[in-house]
Image (cartoon, helix red, strand yellow):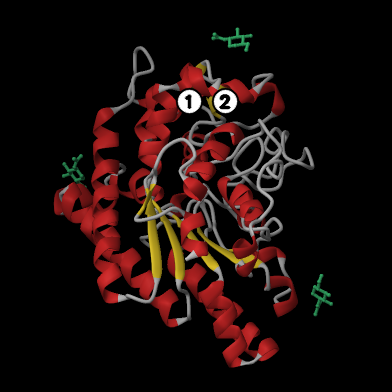
Amino acid sequence: MSIILYYFTLTFFLIPPTILSPPSSSPSPSPSATSVPALFILGDSSVDCGTNNFLGTFARADHPPYGRDFVTHSPTGRFSNGKIPVDFIASRLGLPFVPSYLGLNGTAEEMLRGVNYASAGAGIIFSSGSELGQHISLTQQIQQFTDTVQQFILHLGEAAAANRISRSVFYISIGVNDYIHYYLRNVSDVQNQYLPWTFNQFLASSVEQEIKNLYDLHARRVVVMGLPPIGCAPHYLWQYGSKDGGCIEEINDAIMGFNFAMRFMIDQLHHELPDANVIYCDVFRGSMDILTNHKQYGFNITSDACCGLGKYNGWIMCLMPDMACADASNHIWWDQFHPTEAVNEILADNVWNSKHTRMCYPMSLEEMVQS
Ligand SMILES: *[C@@H]1O[C@H](CO)[C@@H](O)[C@H](O)[C@H]1NC(C)=O
Ligand SMILES: *[C@@H]1O[C@H](CO)[C@@H](O)[C@H](O)[C@H]1NC(C)=O
Ligand SMILES: *[C@@H]1O[C@H](CO)[C@@H](O)[C@H](O)[C@H]1NC(C)=O
């Protein structure tokens, strides 16, 4: 039983996607957007597009009903009924869907438009999420990117490879599993040793170091996502016995502390790496806007997951089509931890151009790639 419960825990939702409108309907890529040759993605289940299909883990989304509203109407490994945020971002940049690193044959040709290294269950801390099985941690994902850089150098030459990478966008969405699978579970007595504030400082400085490692590999355009309000996720509403669907404040407070530490760290980074463009996007803020103004966005089911079992559908993870609602588009939550495609699209639009809520500081992604 607990295996099933935790299976889900891995991945969370970050920024998400939607099915409401064809993603390519509005934005034909602007001329400057075509100057972004590739999108590289690092993170957890919020942006995993199939990495974990290759791993021995409970954290997999390779079975129906996952993917039922995706363009192929079949599971891909995305933890959503349809698209995830980076699918919408890739369209905005004029790029194809970004392939998962583990599904590639390792040649530069396949990686030139971008690679997705994200792995459900992964955290900033190496061992976060390891009770679920295998995953590729953030540090390992950057090692895989190092391999990609070597392939680019062999294929393009050193100067062209560096130029290509420096014009590419890096999208980092990670950290929630350091709460779900580490801090909140009190692994290694962590709560006794670190107050939330100190733990957040530790996580933020680890991410800072990883961004510097990417910088040394020529990355200059980086999007860092904050964490969503997981205290509002159906699993925690179930676990903490929420009576009326109210969010679990104790969890959201910890998440806000993390987000604060991340934003502060990125402000510092602007001084240390003046020729890099690093933006921080506050998914918490964008998600709370959706929860609060759900009617305007067309959501009338805000606390129950579309797919799952138990109160709020938050007890047992989404295992089979029979467990899913008929229409995910009026739901905020797809499963115990992840939002629907509709939410993912709204959040991706906010990252791109602050369409509904200003989420990214000091500028939006569109402004970044045009600068
Ligand atoms: C790798 O994949 C690309 C594109 O699918 C293909 O053109 C190439 O021949 C493959 N290379 C190897 C070594 O399999
Ligand atoms: C965390 O675990 C340790 C023992 O491993 C325990 O002493 C401590 O009270 C726990 N902290 C919390 C907040 O549950
Ligand atoms: C949500 O709206 C749909 C129609 O859009 C309706 O069929 C459904 O009964 C509503 N559910 C709730 C809980 O209000």
User: Residue at image x 45%, y 64%?
Assistant: 222
**Mark 1 residue crowding within 10 angstroms, few (<14) / some (14–19) / many (20+):** many
Q: Secondary structure at mark 1?
A: loop
Looking at the picture, tell me which residue is in the foreground, 336 or 339.
339
Residue 87 vertical position relative to residue 98 in the rendered view, above or below: above
Residue 82 x/y as whole percent: 67, 38
Residue 281 x/y as whole percent: 39, 50
User: Residue at image x 28%, y 60%?
Assistant: 204
Residue identified by numbered label 1: 314
Residue 78 shows which numbered tag?
A: none
User: Residue at image x 64%, y 92%?
Assistant: 157
Q: Quadrant of ligand 2?
A: top left
Residue 179 x/y as whole percent: 33, 46
User: Residue at image x 68%, y 29%?
Assistant: 320
Number of callouts? 2
Q: Amino acid at mark 1?
A: Gly
Looking at the picture, tell me which residue is in the foreground, 183 or 225.
225
Q: Is residue 331 left or right of residue 219?
A: right
CB within 8 Å, label 2 to label 1:
yes
Residue 273 vertical position relative to residue 93 in the rendered view, above or below: below
Q: Secondary structure at mark 2?
A: loop
Residue 150 vertical position relative to residue 101 in the rendered view, above or below: below
Residue 134 x/y as whole percent: 53, 58
Q: Is residue 195 left or right of residue 342?
A: left
Residue identified by numbered label 2: 308
Q: Residue furthest front?
A: 31
Residue 212 vertical position relative to residue 361 in the rendered view, above or below: below
Residue 2 in view in this figure: yes
**Rendered image quadrant of residue 130:** bottom left
Q: Amino acid at mark 2?
A: Gly
